[in-house]
Amino acid sequence: MHAKASVDGTVIAETDNYEFVEGNVYFPPSSIKDAATILKPTDHQTFCPWKGHSSYYSINVNGKELENAAWYYPQPYEKAANIKDHVAFYKTKVLIEKD
């Protein structure tokens, strides 16, 4: 199975090894293209009762910033250990394709 994330035609993540949880594709950190340049940590956080606390990134692609458009779980609860540090993207801000 293959998954790809893109912003305005620029691929920002691509993998054959992703996790699919609650309708979201979670990309392994190694699949993020040029992560140090495009992902900027923010102070935003949310909480999920079974996954734990999530942290957020803004995405910067071709001079365009998408605020808090990606999230990950740096210390997920045990039931969500499979998505530790994997990055998910808001489908309203990033085009996600999977098969």
Image (cartoon, rainbow, N blue to C red):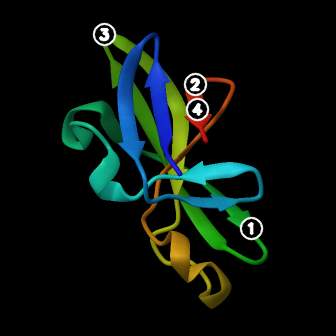
Q: Residue 97 carries which label?
A: 4
Q: Residue 63 carries which label?
A: 3
Please name which of the two marks, 2 or 4, marks the residue nearer to the observer. Answer: 4
Local SS, label 2: strand
**Residue at image coords 52%, 42%:** 70
Local SS, label 1: strand
Q: Does label 3 or label 4 sit earlier along the sequence?
A: 3
Q: Mark 2 points at which residue?
A: 95
Amino acid at circle 1: Cys
**Residue at image coords 46%, 10%:** 8
Q: Mark 1 points at which residue?
A: 48
Q: How far apart are marks 3 and 2 (CA)?
A: 17 Å
**Residue at image coords 34%, 18%:** 61
Q: How many marks?
A: 4
Residues at circles 2 and 4 in contact by the CB criterion of under 8 Å: yes
Q: Which mark is residue 37?
A: none
Residues at circles 1 and 2 in contact by the CB criterion of under 8 Å: no
Q: Does label 1 or label 4 sit earlier along the sequence?
A: 1
Using the image, determine if residue 45 lies above or below residue 50.
above
Q: How far apart are marks 3 and 4 (CA)?
A: 23 Å
